[in-house]
Image (cartoon, grey):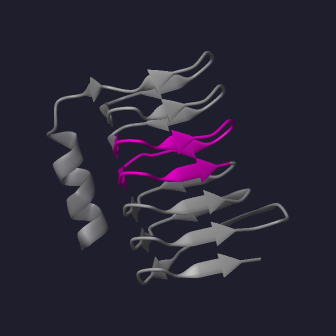
Amino acid sequence: DIIHANGTILEKIDPYNHGQIEKNVKLEGNIMIGKNTILKSNVKIIGPTIIGEYCVIDEDSVIGPNTSIGNNCNISKCKVSESIIMDNCKIDSNIKIEESIIAYNSEIIMNYQNTDGKKFLLGEGTKIIF
């Protein structure tokens, strides 16, 4: 499927970092970080993972493995694995997202903690507010 193919492709890309990494960030495995992307303190990235340009991965987020994040995304307080998040997405939620495809310009906001794994298949411009 698409998510499995994504992981296979990511494993073959040479790692790079064109972004900014703050203190106490943990990086494991094959990781690609795009231009002007910021990884805030206490973020953990598990490869293979690619993060596009002009993204902000906010404190206490965990990304990967087998995850692709497009350009201009803001990810805050969540765990994302085995997923594809396309350009211009915002996720501000204490949630665990797995095996998901989130299309362009989508937004997920949750105002309470939910550590259960969630699977999303979101079309372009979808907004989910819990």
Q: Is residue 109 left or right of residue 100?
A: right
Q: Can you tell which quarter of the image residue 96 is in?
A: bottom right
Q: Is residue 57 left or right of residue 129?
A: left
Q: Is residue 127 above or below residue 27?
A: below
Task: Report the front residue among 128 and 44.
Answer: 128
x and y percentages locating residue 17 in the rendered image? 32, 24
Residue lying farthest to the top in this orientation = 23
Q: Which residues are magenta?
A: 50-76
Q: Is residue 56 above or below residue 86?
A: above
Asked if residue 71 lies in the magenta stretch, the reply is yes
Quarter of the image where the N terminus is located: bottom left
Q: Is residue 73 left or right of residue 69?
A: right
Q: Can you tell which quarter of the image residue 110 is in?
A: bottom right
Q: Is residue 106 above or below residue 47?
A: below
Total numbered circles: 0
Q: Please name the residue shown 55% across and 41% down the image.
A: 57
x and y percentages locating residue 15 in the rendered image? 24, 28
x and y percentages locating residue 78 in the rendered image? 65, 52
Q: Please name the residue shown 58% across and 42% down the image.
A: 62
Q: Please name the residue shown 48% across and 35% down the image.
A: 45
Task: Report the front residue among 44 and 54.
Answer: 54
x and y percentages locating residue 42 in the rendered image? 66, 27
Quarter of the image where the C terminus is located: bottom right
Q: Is residue 74 above or below residue 95?
A: above
Asked if residue 99 lies in the magenta stretch, the reply is no
Residue lying farthest to the right in this orientation = 112
